[in-house]
Image (cartoon, rainbow, N blue to C red):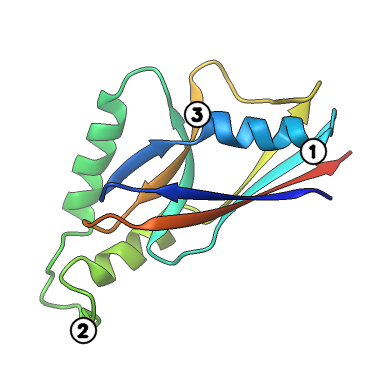
Amino acid sequence: MPTTLLTEPTRGRGMIDITSQVQAAVTASGVVDGLCTVFIQHTSASVLIQENADPTVRTDFETWMSRVVPDGDPDFVHDAEGPDDMPAHIRAALTAVSLGIPVVDGRLALGTWQGVYVYEHRTRPHSRRVLVTTIAG
């Protein structure tokens, strides 16, 4: 069960396409048919499968998320690292910290417009660790 650690630098809040890195890990594993799991080792960032063709989808996603979980909400007590601290944790809980993606013929079985993303929920840059494990079926 090969596992690869990806270290992804972020520039602050937003989505970073990691599809090619995940596919490279699958290719290196030698698994032809099976399952790829993608797991982010953080509580203030997440991983998503999202549209990879039109960047306005990611912009609209962030617009909606900012409305639902605004920074600096006075009801939040946890703000040890700033006004985006608790909102980042809630955003991660609303999205996903792990994904399961089928592997078929050595390739991620993503749809035509799907990509794999790290979604940074903090406003400042971070270095995010993502584990990619490929299991033969």
Query: Who comes first in sequence, dot 3 or dot 1?
Result: 1
Q: Quadrant of residue 117?
A: top left
User: Image point 81% across, 21% down: which residue?
Assistant: 105
Expressed as whole percent of the image width and height from the top left, the position of residue 90 reads 34, 65
User: Image point 21% across, 84% down: which residue?
Assistant: 77
Q: Secondary structure at mark 2?
A: loop
Tell me: 69 left or right of 21: left
Expressed as whole percent of the image width and height from the top left, the position of residue 124 reads 23, 57
Query: Who comes first in sequence, dot 2 or dot 3?
Result: 2
The residue indicated by pointer 3 is 115
Q: Secondary structure at mark 1?
A: helix
Query: Who comes first in sequence, dot 2 or dot 1?
Result: 1
Query: Whole-Å distance between the Cαs marked 2 and 3?
Result: 35 Å
Q: Which mark is residue 29?
A: 1
Query: Whole-Å distance between the Cαs marked 2 and 1?
Result: 44 Å
The residue indicated by pointer 2 is 77
Q: Is residue 14 above or below residue 90?
A: above
Expressed as whole percent of the image width and height from the top left, the position of residue 68 reads 22, 54
Q: Quadrant of the C terminus?
A: top right
Which is in the foreground here, disc 3 or disc 1?
Answer: 1
Which is in the foreground here, disc 2 or disc 1?
Answer: 1
